[in-house]
Amino acid sequence: MEEAIQIVNNIQQGKLAPVYFLMGEEPYYVDKISDFIAENVLTEEERGFNQMMLYGRDTSVDEIASNARRFPMMAEKQVVIVKEAQELSRTIENLTAYAENPQPTTVLVICYKYKKIDKRKKLYKAVKKSGVIFESKRLYENQVGSWIQKTLKNRDYSISPKAAQMLVEFLGTDLGKINNELEKLQLITPKGTQITPELIEENIGISKDFNNFELRNAIGQRDTLKAHRIINYFAQNPKDNPLVVTVSLLYSYFSQLLQYHGLPDKSKASVAKQLKINPYFVQDYTLAAKNYPMKKVSHVIDLLHQTDAKSKGIGAANVAHGDLLKELLVKIMH
């Protein structure tokens, strides 16, 4: 995130590179940087003659280089943006000759999503020398909550830890999807607002009471009644609460509990660092660890493996996923 912000700041200050090679598994920042260049390097009047959008599927490396070598018309710069450049993965190395001697009046932007070029090859080294290479790495699930908090803070909003966790568990690690939902919330709430579970439930449709986060807490607290209520809700709404997601999240949770039991230092700061969780949630893990000794945690992890296999038809053909979940809960809680 900081590297992307630095690139944008440099562009705002007029420090333009002749080549931007934007690559990596997370497309969010690739799109954000390329869109910023498209909207800010040239004036609206200059874009008509001096801004070109090419697509990897419909162009070639030779055509890209040829367009990049053109001179701008009645402007200091021209911008050439290549979207979906990963479609040219077999020939992209041929762009090396241009990258070694780029046209100084051109800003060439290569959007190479979901992949990255080999750092040992000539193209990477040439772009690194003459321009900017940005690798957008996909965040791990435990990093997304912090990303949400930082993103909202930059926009003069805040979010409660529980609300952030709800978004992560419902939307996963796709920053584009999460950002779309955050922008919807910003449209209906004034700056300075804290995003709460209630706001998310009302405007995004994620239940603040019946979700995997609440199920995990109920199990951790050994609140049998609450856990069964959530499981029954899941069974009645299987499309919105797929078994595979619930089992995966519970597996991650109990794996963290297993790790917790093995920590020599169980201070709040140490646990947060080692488990890679928000310090706000450390108390929940401390309570859950008391309710589930190490031997029980290992048993639950085995139960989760069994449930995952059954959900795929191994040893339990034609059993409804809701029934598998209810069976799992009984075995965990008793």
Image: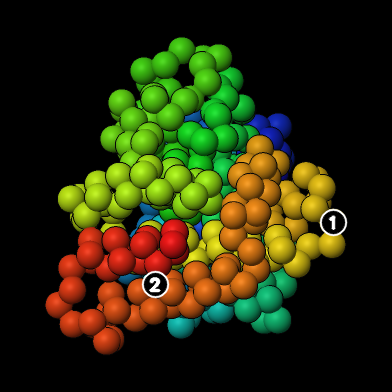
Q: Earlier in the sequence, mark 1 or mark 2?
A: 2
Circle 1/circle 2 CB separation < 8 Å = no
Q: Which residue corresponds to mark 2? A: 87
Question: Is residue 276 visible in the rendered structure shown here?
Answer: yes
**Colour mode?**
rainbow
Question: Is residue 127 visible in the rendered structure shown here?
Answer: no
Given the current orientation, which residue lies at the most extreme right position?
Answer: 265
At x 46% / y 82%, what residue is drawn?
Answer: 90
Q: Could you say where residue 276 lies in the image, as x and y percent from the top left?
A: 68, 54
326 above or below 87?
above
Q: Which mark is residue 202?
A: none
Q: Could you say where residue 323 lies in the image, as x and y percent from the top left?
A: 23, 65
Q: Could you say where residue 212 lies in the image, as x and y percent from the top left?
A: 40, 50
Which amino acid, by three-letter code, is at mark 1? Answer: Asp
Q: Which residue corresponds to mark 1? A: 265
321 or 289: nearer the eye? 289
Given the current orientation, which residue lies at the most extreme left position?
Answer: 318
Q: Could you say where residue 242 lies in the image, as x and y percent from the top left?
A: 28, 59
162 above or below 116?
above
At x 23% / y 61%, what residue is drawn?
Answer: 322
306 above or below 288?
below
Which amino acid, by three-letter code, is at mark 2? Answer: Glu
